[in-house]
Image: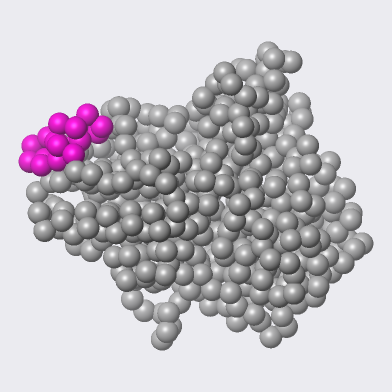
Amino acid sequence: MRSSLNAARRARELDEARTSVVDVLVVGLGVTGAGAALDAASRGLSVAAVDAHDLAFGTSRWSSKLVHGGLRYLASGQVGVAWESAVERGALLRHTAPHLVAAHPYLLPLTSDVGPGEAATVMAGYRLGDALRAAAGTPRSLLPGPSRLTAARALALAPSLRPHGLRGALLSWDGRVVDDARLVVAIARTAAAHGARVLTRCRVLALAGDGARVRDELTGAEFDIRARAVVNATGVWAGGLVPSVTLRPSRGTHLVLRPGALGALRAGLHVPIPGERARFALVLPQADGRVYVGLTDEPLDGPVPDVPEAPESDVAFLLEVLGGVLDRPLGRDQVAGAFAGLRPLVDGPGGAGGATADLSRRHAVLRSPDGVVTVVGGKLTTYRRMAEDAVGAACPHAPASRTARLPLAGAGPVRPGLPRRLVLRYGAEAGAVLDLTRRDPALAEPVAAGITLADLVWAARHEGALDAGDLLDRRTRIGLVPEDRAAALPAAEAALRCA
């Protein structure tokens, strides 16, 4: 397949990148960098895209898995950001990634902590968000409107809620991505299908407007990639390559609850955070039975780590907030794992100060004196628009962007009769993954969290996974639970040998 990424293709295209001049060099292969590589390649430009680690190694795999219409931004008066979010959500649902992004219901429990006035205000916000949905052209069939539920109906959808004092719930719908890292992989593979050279494990040592000095992290060899334009899409690490870029990173922590911790949860939850206006903790059930709970928003001081840690104080905070609406609060033993991501927030006028939760999620495209274009800020939902703006700034005379309706790898008709688990992960490619197990029944062996050996082999052959960490921590999310990761490590190593 033209979209396949693997070790052999990397080696071949790495040699090509050393000896040619590309139209665009993209640094960073999170969602925005992969999006920039696709945007440029689909315009007919030659592209090299590099990352020091793996696809979706940084912030893009630590999101809340939401593809949302910007309701929170409406509450804070950021109408432009909310509109942009609604438009981009619609593009993902309708055109580019309907196999990875779908509508999901969320309940806001009406407890004694949510008075009638506050409930009316929230519902008004939901209805305003629904009006944005309609204006953006997203049909109700893809994203239903809000409603109010009785207490009995709320408990049927979320049986772990505390029934005493429950007046009902507000039901809203928003988009969610099956797996944020898988979305990045699909974008990168689509870029590769359009001719982009997608090169992981290539660390940029020095960056300028005409290219970069790069080190192959697998061999230690250093070389130059020459380019006519350069896009820095390294997110929270952008200032390390372009010192003039200043950011205020914030840390967002999520918990991973064990299957069954919240009973038969059939909808997500929005849980008001005490003392905060229009801020909610999010509870999101997963297909494998786990449940994610987030999200903190704490300023990050000091050096920016490659992989941030979730502190116990964040774990305790989220458990406390969640416990406020549950019949039986959860203990620490129900937390199977935790993860933290860093948001690359653009600092407001006047520099540091104030809460990072109050900073705008609007993105910025900046040009350094030597011509490097840096794109920062924003969020997962609006990655495509961020990429379009960055490439437009870097290559102002290039053809117009084509990505608003460009299907990503896996989008398209699905062969009838395929297992639902495969369809949710692979879309139109589900049949090809199933065929692996028909040719070699041993690949149907379960590994963990609903993943089989065939998933791991497919990732190594077609999704650019080069080592066990790529397989367990990004192509699948087995690694979110440490004991699952340890148990699955031999299978990951076996899959790499099969590839």
Image quarter where the N terminus lies is top right
Residue at (69% x, 40% y) in the render: 463
Between 472 and 302, the one nearer to me in the picture = 472
Q: Tell me the residue at 89%/54% (across/down).
A: 15
Q: In the figure, 26 relative to 289: above or below? A: below
Q: Which quadrant is home to the C terminus? A: top right
Position of 265 with respect to 465 (left or right) is: left
Q: Residue placed farthest to the right in the image?
A: 19
Residue 341 seen anywhere in this rendered image of the structure: no
Q: Main secondary structure of the magenta part?
A: loop
Q: 91 left or right of 299? A: right
**By what rule are the colours in the image chosen?**
one colour
Residue 456: image location, x then y, percent: 65, 30
Foreground residue, 306 or 409?
A: 409
Query: How many numbered discs sit on the rendered protein?
Result: 0
Q: Position of residue 310 (x, y in %)?
A: 42, 52
Whether residue 277 is situated above or below residue 168 in the rendered picture: below
Q: Is residue 221 magenta?
A: no
Q: Is residue 167 magenta?
A: yes
**Is residue 462 in sight in this rendering?**
yes
Taking depth in this image into account, of 383 and 252 the one nearest to the observer is 383
- Residue 36's image quarter? bottom right
Left or right of residue 277: residue 430: right
Query: Which percent across, then down, holds residue 306?
Result: 57, 57
Residue at the image point whose x is 76% and y is 51% from the top: 194
Above or below: residue 142 compared with residue 214:
above
The range drawn in magenta is 149-168
Residue at the (13%, 46%) spot, across then down: 111
Task: Residue 298 in the image: state x and y as whole percent.
Answer: 37, 63
